[in-house]
Image (cartoon, rainbow, N blue to C red):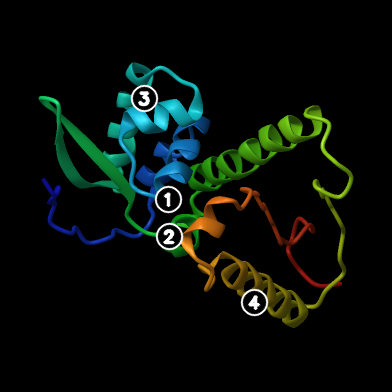
Amino acid sequence: MPGKKKEESTSRPAGLEQMRALSHPLRLRLLELFAERPRTTKQAAEALGEPTTKLYHHVAALERAGLVRLRETRQNRGTTEKYFEVTQSQFLTKADPALLQNEEAQAVMGFVLFDQAREELVRALSSSPRPGTVVAVRGILRLSRAEAKRLRKELVALVKRVSEPGASDARSRTRRRRYTLTIALLPADRDGGET
């Protein structure tokens, strides 16, 4: 029997509530799984190697914050399976600019992005990766505001281009490895001014 489709809800722009929901590293990992394809909490738990009961609270927090939604329900041997999906493909980039001036929002965003990146880097390095599979770079650039704006635009375009689904078939997509990429381009001077 085909699953019942739940009514589409409108995507809310990312807000402080959403950033707070993402401040737990497990929720960020859940969000990534639901972004890959609709899944049940049980399927997500199996992928993460976590007990299902531990994840119900986290999935509910993501749903309350508007980051995931119930896509469909299916009957399976007397139980109802609930499949969740992400509500939008980008969250923090769609945040209200006034929100990004909020110190709490900035702290949460920094924690979410870079604590997760740190965990992933440590895990990758401890698994004895083959040479060339892990790249970690930190550089100090001296740029004018116009150059920084142009670089930001190029980075966003590059990430969009490589993230778009290719023309390859579904079988080749399943053989692809998952990679993470964390980029921060920000003024390092305390006053943010040019010298």
Disc 1 and disc 4 in contact, CB within 8 angstroms: no
Q: Position of residue 192 (x, y in %)?
A: 73, 64
Q: Which residue bears the numbered disc 2?
A: 89
Upstream in sequence: badge 3 or badge 4: 3
Residue 129, image quadrant: top right
Residue drawn at (21%, 37%), measured in percent from left and top? Answer: 82
Q: Mark 3 points at which residue?
A: 55
Q: Residue 153 carries which label?
A: 4
How many numbered tags mark residues here?
4
The answer to whether 47 appears left or right of 177 in the picture is left
- Give the number of the disc on residue 73: none
Circle nearer the N terminus (3, 1) = 1
Alpha-carbon span between mark 3 and mark 1: 16 Å
Marks 3 and 1 in Cβ contact (< 8 Å): no
- Mark 1 — residue? 35
User: How far apart in space, not on screen, are marks 2 and 3 (Cα)?
Assistant: 22 Å
Marks 3/4: CA distance? 37 Å
Secondary structure beneath label 1 = helix
Q: Residue at x 44, y 64 (%)?
A: 94
- Image marks 3 and 4: residues in contact by CB distance under 8 Å: no
Local SS, label 2: loop
Where is residue 50 drawn, in percent x and y? 46, 20
Amino acid type of the residue that numbered disc 4 sits on in the rendered structure: Lys
Kind of residue at badge 1: Ala
* Quadrant (top left/top right/bottom left/bottom right) for the C terminus: bottom right
Q: Quadrant of residue 95?
A: bottom left
Relative placement, left or right, of 33 versus 159 is left
1 or 4: tag closer to the N-terminus? 1
CB of mark 4 within 8 Å of CB of mark 2? no
Q: Distance between the residues labelled 4 and 2?
A: 18 Å
Assess whether mark 1 and mark 2 are in contact (beta carbons under 8 angstroms): yes
Q: Which residue is drawn at 55% across and 40% down?
A: 112
